Amino acid sequence: MEGACLSKFRAEQILTWVYAKGATRYEEMTNIPKVIREQFDLAFPLHAPSIVTKQESVDGSRKYLLEYHDGTQVETVGLPSSDGRLSVCCSSQAGCAMGCVFCATGRNGLTRNLAPGEIVDQVLAVQDDFGTRVTNVVVMGQGEPFANYDAVMAALRIMNHPKLLNIGARHITVSTCGLVDGIERFTRESEQFTLAVSLHAARQEVRDRIMPTMANQRLGTLRQALDRYAGATGRRFSFEYALMEGVNDSEEDLDALITYCRRLLCHVNLIPLNEVEGSSFKPVSHQLMASWRDSLEAAGIPASVRRSRGADLAGACGQLAAQTK
């Protein structure tokens, strides 16, 4: 019993050193006996990711290509605000298996899942580079978070823990393509993490075409799961909708979206599409995006147009990795 308590105590010490004090080597952990540090160094070596590439936008946002000890690379983005907040958009997987046809990451497929520490390491890397505490996190980079559910939730709890990164649960958002099983599990979690769903079409035939691996996750089933989520948690979720010229931007698409959102506790986030080199998918005009926002608001559905950040960089997830290969 004493040994188990001691093990838990040491684990908490190490977590505090790594996630609260920024230690990258066991030898920095001066309140832990040397013999234990040496044992942990052999059994559980620490591997902080290295920054392979960093791009900085004129608006202050920074996009990073990070490399882990096994050569796996992921992208993460730091987004500073004028009010002192620092948000991080991090990846949950290296690559992605979802295969959304408009997404740069999907072209490269899935390399592997990320471990909890590797997800948190992205936040620490941005925090260290900016020299400022991270206040907000969105798991909206490469990968499908609910396809790596357990690791993502473990990472979020490290971020949220008051003695570690101490980021408020409502300032941590998970974005899913709409995996219903994951949403059901997320609904039962005790923490108040927030939820975003990449919808991109409210007509089944359109969504099946642009998000083919989600064809078995029917829109009606997804809507029921989201309605249960809102009812059980009392929290509003967001729909992400990237408008694409001639694909999901017709009046029929707008009407379908309004119908789909009615009586749901949701917010619609209209997203300017990042153009991908060689892709046939193009963004719509600012005027059309504003028109959609106004139509949604007039129908009683809260909506906004996401402000584009880092537009002068390789904005779409997967582009930075592709450029270095």
Image (cartoon, rainbow, N blue to C red):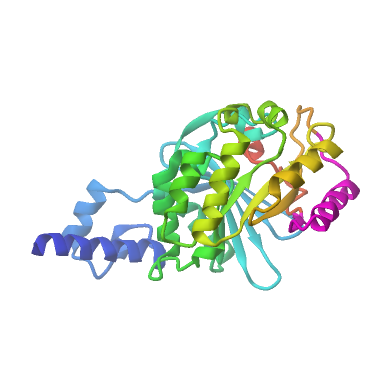
Image quadrant holding the C terminus, namely top right
Give the residue displayed 75% in from the left and 49% down from the top: 270
Give the residue displayed 50% in from the left and 52% down from the top: 122
Give the left or right position of residue 294, taking residue 163 as reference: right
Q: Nearer the viewer, residue 323 or 109?
A: 109
Tell me where residue 11 appears, x and y as whole percent.
25, 60
Tell me where residue 28 appears, x and y as whole percent.
32, 64
Image quadrant holding the N terminus, namely bottom left
Determine the residue located farthest toward the left in the rendered image. Answer: 1
Give the residue displayed 43% in from the left and 47% down from the top: 185
Give the residue displayed 30% in from the left and 48% down from the top: 45
Q: Which image quadrant for residue 107?
A: top right
Tell me where residue 58 appears, x and y as whole percent.
77, 57
As displayed, is residue 260 above or below residue 156? above
Q: Does residue 297 belong to the magenta stretch? A: yes
Q: Nearer the viewer, residue 250 or 265?
A: 265
* Residue 102 in view of the camera: yes
As displayed, is residue 85 above or below residue 174? below
Q: Which image quadrant for residue 166?
A: bottom left
Residue span colored magenta: 282-307
Q: Does residue 294 belong to the magenta stretch? A: yes
* Residue 325 in view of the camera: no
Tell me where residue 268 appears, x and y as whole percent.
71, 52
As displayed, is residue 208 above or below residue 12? above
Give the left or right position of residue 205, taking residue 106 as reference: right
